[in-house]
Image (spheres, grey):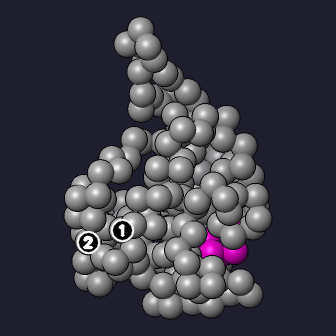
Amino acid sequence: MQLSTDRLMIRPITAEDWPAVREIWAELAPLPMAQYDKPHHTDPETVRARIARWAAFSAAGTEHMFFAACLEGIVIGYIAFNRRDNEHEVGYSFHPAFHGKGYAKEALAAILSRLGSMGFTRFSAGTALNNTPSVKLLTSLGFRLSATEKVSFYKDNAGQDIVFDGGLFELDLAP
């Protein structure tokens, strides 16, 4: 599935996209919001292997779908859809240089619309409630907060879990 929006070309991720994904992860890692996401290893071989798996999953069907959001031929972000029970869990990440410009919303809206037309109607996404841009993105697309939970991906300098409030957001496109 390939989509075009006013500014973006959205296509299945390929194994050759690994350097762009690695750069996204490396640029996001030092930001304060990084504590609200699972850590990503950025050594080239690990990233290369992971993105090759993503590309293979995407080519195999709709159980796991990974898309590259491209601006003028450059991968500026990615969106993932992973089947969980009767829905797809949505994940996304965009290079910080492109935050706040509406690219994530544009890409997600286009993919959700296409998947909805293909019969996929239930989606979920998790984000930290303190991650205001992500919460605003999800709610602007029609996702609703359905549950909260305590989450931790990192430890502080004393070895204590850094715990935050995570939100589970759901979207149902069924008529």
> For residue 3, what is the image quadrant?
bottom right
Residue 106 colored in magenta in the image: yes
Residue 86 pos. (x, y %): 40, 65
Between 53 and 123, which is closer to the camera in this rendering? 53
Q: Please, what is the three-letter code of the amino acid marked with disc 1?
A: Trp
Residue 31: in sight, yes or no?
yes
Q: Please, what is the three-letter code of the amino acid marked with disc 2?
A: Ala
Residue 43 pos. (x, y %): 29, 51
Residue 161 pos. (x, y %): 42, 18
Picture disc at residue 18: 1
Relative height, residue 98 to residue 10 (above, below): above
How would you classify the magenta stretch by its main secondary structure?
helix
Quadrant location, the C terminus? bottom right
Per the image, label 1 sits on a secondary structure element best described as: helix
Residue at (50, 58) in percent of width and height: 24
Residue 156 pos. (x, y %): 45, 17
Residue density around tag 1, few if under 14, some if 14–19, many if 20 or more, within 10 Å: many
Q: Nearer the viewer, mark 2 or mark 1?
A: 1
Between 165 and 120, which is closer to the camera in this rendering? 165
Q: Are marks 2 and 1 in contact (CB under 8 Å)?
A: yes
Relative height, residue 82 to residue 7 (above, below): above
Instruction: Residue at the far top: name it.
Output: 158
User: Which residue matches tag 2?
Assistant: 52
Relative height, residue 165 to residue 75 (above, below): above
> For residue 21, what is the image quadrant?
bottom left
Relative height, residue 107 to residue 34 (above, below): below
Residue range highlighted in magenta: 105-110
Per the image, label 2 sits on a secondary structure element best described as: helix
Residue 147: in sight, yes or no?
no
Residue 68 colored in magenta in the image: no
